[in-house]
Image (spheres, rainbow, N blue to C red):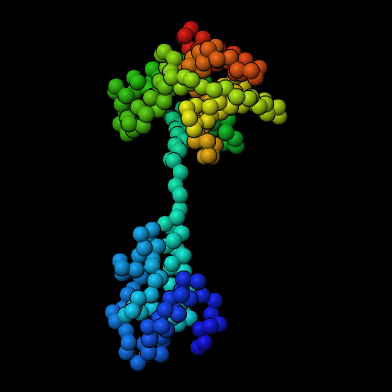
Amino acid sequence: MDRRHLALPDRLCELDRADAEVGGGARQAERGGGWGHRITPGDPSRYAQDGCPSTTATPGSKVNLTRGGIAGMAGWIDRRCDVAQVQTRPWQATIRAQLTRGVGIDQIEEIDTDAEGIFTRRLRVVNGPGPGVIVVLNNARLQELLGELRAEMQTPPAGVDVAGIGAFADLIEDALRCGPPSHLFDGARFSTVTHDESRGILYGHVGLGVDVIGTVRDHAHRLSFEQRVVTGPTGVYRPLSPADCASLVAALKSNPPADTGWQEIGKDAAAIVAACSDE
């Protein structure tokens, strides 16, 4: 077989020529002469410092240059190099949780919370035609639900997952927590506000620190926030707690931005802080 007609990777072609120069080659391999030890892909001596296999020919090295051997080795080299060059990004966490309980004979009550920290309740019939009416729980109803969960944890009925109930209760406490202002928006640099008129959403863009940016999303007077490295993809939007909203209000007062859209976002943030304080 004339190897000049094979489409080889450049580094493998160099290996082929180098073998010929040291008196190797497939025909000599068949006679069993002119070869030293056999180096397989698992041999540590075949790896360069970057984790990819080295294809530098050395006297005494043996490589299978048949058509199948060339294709297999080229594919193996490509896979090794691809794995070595993969870049990872930071982990992102999205938390969703659900409470369920039976009501009466054929009904189920479900309480869900999503990545934006909104708690909803619905009552549906088992195997019924639809999901039932969905109601968003306000702070007063969340306080009532939190009391029920804490009471159930003190004297848990048989078969109840106490750890799961406790985790859901912690999520409610985080949503209700007021406390002093956080430091989330300390030193924030407020940029422009864009308006998605079709969905009624405001997006306020901010700079945090040296190379971190973020976006405050105001949808139906509920605020959420994502942040990321300047060169990274958009992060996950998470609800702004009353403490974070207080931090935003303070930052807007100390460094009023030029874009008037921040006034609308600031009003909604102040309303969230006031509602928490009243309760």
Dividing the picture into quadrants, the one containing residue 147 is top left
Q: Nearer the viewer, residue 275 or 250?
A: 250
Give the quarter of the image for residue 19.
Answer: bottom left
Q: Can residue 111 be spotted in the picture?
A: no
Residue 239, image x and y in percent?
A: 50, 25
Q: Please state the horizontal and vertical placement of residue 276, each as a whole percent of the image.
A: 48, 12
Q: Is residue 76 above or below residue 119?
A: below
The residue under the point 53% across, 39% down is: 231
Which residue is more in the foreground, 143 or 58?
58
Q: Nearer the viewer, residue 43 or 245?
A: 43
Instruction: Please tell me in which quadrant of the rendered image residue 164 appears.
Output: top left
Count of labels in the image: 0
Q: Position of residue 120 (x, y in %)?
A: 52, 26
Q: Is residue 92 above or below residue 118?
A: below
In the displayed orientation, state which residue is furthest to the right: 198
Image point 48% across, 81% down: which residue?
Answer: 67
Point 47% across, 19% down: residue? 186
Residue at the top extreme of this rendering: 278
Please tell me whether residue 4 is drawn above or below residue 269 in the rendered image: below
